[in-house]
Image (spheres, rainbow, N blue to C red):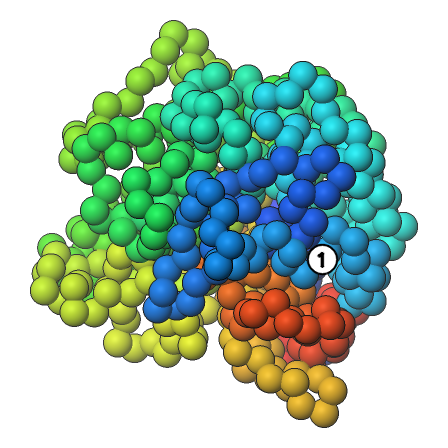
Amino acid sequence: MSENSTVTWPQRSVVSDADGYHFPDGFFWGGATASNQCEGAWDKDGKGESCADHFTSGTKDEPRRFTGEFDPTAKYPSHNAIDHYDRYEEDIRLFAEMGFKMYRMSINWTRIFPNGDDEKPNQAGLDHYRKVFELCHEFGIEPLVTMSHYEFPYALSLKWNGWEDRRTIDCFVRFTTTIMREYKDLVKYWLTFNEINTPLMGGGPTFSLGMLPETEELRFGKGDALHGEEATRIVNGIHHQFLASARTVLEGRKINPEFKFGCMIASNVVYPYSCKPEDVMVAWDIQQRTNYYCGDVMVRGEYAPFTERYLRELGATLSIEPGDLELLREGTVDFYSLSYYMSGCGTADKAVLNANRSVFSTAKNPYLKASEWGWQIDPEGLRYYLDETYGRYKVPLMVVENGLGAMDKVEDGTVHDGYRVDYLREHIKAIVRAMDDGADVLGYLMWGCIDIVSASTGEMRKRYGFVYVDKDDEGNGTLARLRKDSFWWYQRLIASNGSSLEE
């Protein structure tokens, strides 16, 4: 190590002995939600419309729709969600009962600036989140705040087509500096953009980029079809988000030098469908463009070497203005956070892909089982991704989304979700193996720690949580919270700091 090298965080590892696994002191156990999927109260206390408020519900077979005008015959699940806005005290007390060390949540941009470009913030929104953070600290829970989690102001979509326009950068930085100043003594850990790479994976440009769609249907898994003018809009929209993130990081460090900033990447683990060199290279290429295109800019501060070739294949033109590259170099993040749910396979054989397509433009793996929604279950893929990512970037990692969507049933006043416990156990064991390999992992935040609206389908029946919420897809139910079997399992796991993992 050179004399100029610095180490911000010490290497972390898991100790295993006869008593089980022992995670390092300070490991962040917890859970995660997003405001558009849990809060409801979509037009309460001065909140403006977000793009999420214009998405209807759907199913795994029927896509969600984006409607500019609200359809009186359709259901818009973000409008009420699980009423976390008014029930946050009850919910956070449940998280505290489990022993959460960290709660990942998002601040809805349109609660603070209803139109995205307002001159003054909405005080009711600022007051609400202050109460949430103060309650978290009362229970010893560290907030991890996502600044933009699919909650783009609809007014800016109409005005500038979202992140397609560089003027959105100034609006976002006004929002982020406002909340950083407001909560500088309550929030230390920040994520600028949720799953910033999803538009490259076919997640749709409206969710994360606020760009108005050409058709109402929202379909995931069309990343391999991205090309031409649409690709140009998307890569430039993401570039503008990179710049907004970098400016936010630089401004945040002025506000509080103790702030820690992370990127958030939707991990895309892709194995070769066969050992044919063509399949190996397709798998390699998908991982490069979906994982490292964004990761390199946000962590290394520069576009990856393959970018020119990738843009040429997309038929896309990236508009870089003077000062952009210098800003990206200066505003890099401190840690790398990720979501992980499944893996896929890359193949050069279009017939194989089309006959065997998975959720995200890759081929299904014949060796893996899948959830009820077709998401293939692969704990070892998490270890693979953590090892690869840490080896590339050498910054601390945090798993901020991982979980199993399932159709839970209430029996005997609870939910016997041993299948969820099995899923979580095996993925946490994969983290143990990655840490044993040398990866520095700061924490594990289970996604949808309380049942929330599914982002991909808009359903309630697709449940992830440790806590069951009495609400169905039709909006019926009491909203009562019930502790599932997994609630008690996670409580024991946190209390033992991992030593009860094998139970």
At x 36% / y 52%, what residue is drawn?
218
Front residue of this view, candidates 212 and 240 = 212
Identify the image quadrant of residue 436.
bottom right
Whether residue 205 sits left or right of residue 434 in the image: it is left
Identify the image quadrant of residue 464.
bottom right
Front residue of this view, candidates 198 and 287 = 198
Asked if residue 464 can be seen in this view, the reply is no
Whether residue 88 sits left or right of residue 80 in the image: it is right
Can you give x and y, in whole percent of width and height, for residue 151 in the image? 56, 41
Q: Using the image, determine if residue 44 lies above or below residue 258.
A: below
Characterize the local packing of mark 1: few (<14), some (14-19) or many (20 or more) Cα atoms within 10 angstroms.
some
Whether residue 271 sits left or right of residue 325 in the image: it is left
Q: Using the image, determine if residue 143 lies above or below residue 243.
A: below
At x 58% / y 53%, what residue is drawn?
78
At x 61% / y 62%, what residue is drawn?
452
Residue type (three-letter) at the residue carrying disc 1: Asp
Front residue of this view, candidates 268 and 392 = 268
At x 31% / y 29%, what residue is drawn?
233
State the residue position of label 1.
83
